[in-house]
Amino acid sequence: MENYYLAIDIGASSGRHILGWMENGKMRIEEIYRFENHLEDKDGELCWDIERLFAEVVKGIRKCGELNRIPKSIGIDTWGVDFILLDKDNKMLGDAVGYRDSRTKGMDKKVYEIISEKDLYKRNGIQKMLINTIYHLYSVKLNKPELLEKAEHFLMIPEYLNYRLTGIMKNEYTNATTTQLVNAESCDWDWELMDMLGLPRRIFGKLHMPKESVGMLKPDIAKEVGFSSEVVLPATHDTGSAVLSVPTNDEEAIYISSGTWSLMGIERLIPDCTEVSRIHNFTNEGGYHYRYRYLKNIMGLWMMQSIRKEFPHKYTFEELFTLAYIGRYFKSIVDVTDICFLAPKSMKQAVQEYCRKTDQPEPQTECELLFCVYNSLAKCYGDVVNEIEKVTENNYENIYVVGGGCQDRFLNRLTALYTKKNIYAGPVEATAIGNLTAQMLKADEFSDLAHARRVIAKSFAVKKVNDDEFCFED
Ligand code: LFR
C-alpha cells in the first residue's frame, strides 16, 4: 500500500486537491478535486469567500475517502499576504479582504511617517508593494480600529483553514514573511516594528516551520470526510512551495514561478537588505529550511486572464498564441509592475491608457492587445534578469519556469528571446509538488531537499524551450 499525501493548493483563480505518492523512486501525483476562486465585491471591498473556500477544502478531502486513498498527511498552501482576525471567542472579525483591495491606498506614506522606507527594508528586506499585509493592517488600524482592539489572533488564509480543520492555530514562517513584519535576520516577528506601528503583539503567534505538525482533523471534520489524518505545514505561501520544487540543484539557476503572478528570482542562503537591493526592489521572502527567495513580483498572467475575460469569444490557448503572434508588428510596451494593472475595472482600457500616457500607439485589436501584454511581460523578464545579474554580480545561464504559466509556449519563446538564456518549462503543478515535498520530507521519503529536487527532476516533464517555435526574424 502506498503512502498518500494530500496537497491542497489554492490560488487566486482556482484551488485543487492533489494526491501524491512515491512509486519506484519517482513522485506521482493525481488531481482529485478542483474548484473556482475569485475576489468579489462585498460592501465596497474586494473579499474572498472564505466560508465557501473552507467548504471546498472539506469536499476535496472527502474525495480521498471516496477513492479509498487515505492520506497520511494533508497540507494547505495559498497566495500570501492576506489574513483574518479572530476575537476572544475565535470568531472572525470583519471580512477576508483580499490584497487587491484599495484600502491600502496612501498607507505607505502613513507607515513611512513612523519608519522610513529605507529603515523598513533594512529590517525585513521585503520589496515595497502596496499589497503587503503591513499596509492592510495599518489601514485597519486607522479606519477600523475596533477590529484590532477586539482581535486576539492573526491568522493568514492557510492558517485559518488549518484552524477550521483541526481547531489548532499556528502561524507559519514562509507566509509570515510576506506580511513585511518578520525580521530577515532573526526570522521571527519584528516585535519592535509592531510596537512602532501600534500593532498589538498579542495577536501574532509563535512562528512554525514547514514540516511541523498542525494537528489531527477535528472529530466533526473526520466524521464528515470519513477518515482522520494529520494536517501538517508545507511552505504555506504558494510561492514558497513552488520554488521548493524547482527541478534542479543548480544554485546558479533563475526561476520564474508563473501563475497569476510571475515571481522571478533566485534562491539564496543569506538575505540582502542593502540599499542597492532596495533600490532595485528585490524581496527576501522566507523559504524552506531558512532559504531566501530573492525575487521580484511581476504582474504575470493576471493581465492575460483579465484581458481574456473582456474578449467576446472564449479562445483556446492555441488560438490566443496565434492571435498574439499575428500582433507582433505592434511595438508599444507597458510596465507590467505598474500598480495601475493591479485591479483595473477594465484591463484593456488600463493598457490603452498606459500607452496613451506614455505617448505610444494604443492597441486596438485583440491581436495587438495580446502581443502588447506578452511582449511587455517578456521584456520585463529580460530587465529583471539584468538586474539580478547586476545586483548579485553573477551570470546565470538557465531559467526554470514552473507553475501553470509554464505551459504558455508563446510566452516561453518570448522569454528566451528577451533573456537570451536557456529556458526550461515544468513542472506544471509546481506548487502542489512543493507542498507534497515538504510533507514527504517530514515523512522521511527524501533524505533532504537536494534529494527531493533530484526526484522531482526525474518525475515530471521539464522541457527545454525550442528556439524554432514562433519565428521573430521578420
Ligand atoms: C503568488 C503570490 C505571490 C504574492 C501574491 C500575493 O500567488 O503568493 O507570491 O506576492 O501572490 O499574495
Image: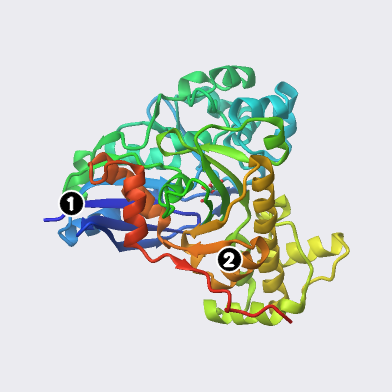
Q: Which of marks 1 and 2 is in front?
A: 1
Residue of label 1: 3
Q: Which of marks 1 and 2 is nearer the N terminus?
A: 1
Which residue was labeled with disc 2? 305
Which of 410/448 is in front?
448
* Above or below for 342 versus 119: below
Specify few, some or many for label 2: CA neighbours under 10 Å numbering under 14, 14-19, or 20 or more.
few
Q: Is mark 1 on a helix, strand or loop?
A: loop
Q: How is the image coloured?
A: rainbow
How many residues crowd mark 1 within 10 Å: few (<14), some (14–19), many (20+)? some
Three-letter code, disc 2: Gln
Q: Given the image, on which type of amino acid does mark 1 rest?
A: Asn
Locate residue 110, reporting x and y percent.
73, 29
User: Residue at image x 65%, y 54%?
Assistant: 343
Tell me if residue 245 can be seen.
yes
Depth order, front residue of 189/56: 189
Q: Which of 99 and 69 is in front in this view?
A: 69
Q: How far apart are the alpha carbons under marks 1 and 2?
A: 37 Å
Query: Dividing the image into 4 quarters, which one contains the C terminus?
Result: bottom right
- Where's residue 271, x and y in %? 56, 32
Q: Can residue 52 be seen in this view?
A: no
Secondary element at tag 2 = helix
